[in-house]
Image (spheres, rainbow, N blue to C red):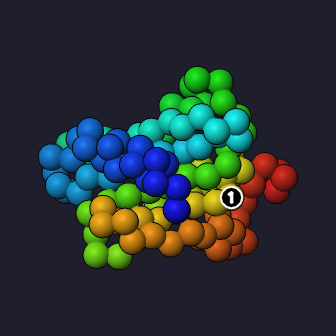
Amino acid sequence: MDKEFFAAALQAREKAYAPYSDFAVGAAVKTAGGKVYTGCNVENASYGLTCCAERNAIFAAIAAGERRFASLCVVADTKEPVAPCGACRQVMREFGIDRVILANCAGKHLAMTVEELLPYSFGPESL
């Protein structure tokens, strides 16, 4: 695992706003050009308005004009590497992020493809 990439996700986790679940998550997305954008989960008293770290990192990159991605790393303080939710998996699929690193704060990690995380997915070519 790329230690600097993991460190960026771990550092983003420190900025999480998680007063309701106390479950802080950080993510880093790397563009095809090697630039890294980070995000953290941001909760809301109206739970449906919460946004995950993975989507916040991707959306920050999109807002900066990025469109091509290489990989994403997500990290949380869990016993095993943390997995992204279904909504985040679909957003990763939309933007062609194929390599996903699931990690915990201790550095235990697992690399997977989006296809492994979201088999038989729906994407732009499905329209």
Nearest the eye: 120 or 127: 120
Q: Position of residue 78 (x, y in %)?
A: 28, 69
Relative to 75, is 29 above or below?
Answer: above
Going by the image, does 38 lie left or right of 31? left
Determine which quarter of the picture holds residue 69.
top right
Q: Residue at x 57, y 61 (%)?
A: 100
Q: Residue at x 38, y 58 (%)?
A: 75
Which residue is disc 1 drawn over? Answer: 98
Q: Residue at x 72, y 60 (%)?
A: 122
Relative to 127, is 49 above or below?
Answer: above
Going by the image, does 74 lie left or right of 50? right
Nearest the eye: 82 or 35: 35
Q: Position of residue 117 (x, y in %)?
A: 59, 70
What is the crowding at mark 1: few (fewer than 14 residues within 10 Å), some, or many (at least 20)?
some
Nearest the eye: 113 or 125: 113
Residue 62 at least partly seen: yes
Q: Residue at x 54, y 37 (%)?
A: 36
Number of marks drawn: 1
Q: In the displayed image of the protein, which residue is found farthest to the top?
A: 64
Residue 16 at least partly seen: no
Q: Could you tell me the amino acid type at mark 1?
A: Asp
Q: Position of residue 4 (x, y in %)?
A: 46, 47
Going by the image, does 32 lie left or right of 105? right
Q: Secondary structure at mark 1?
A: loop
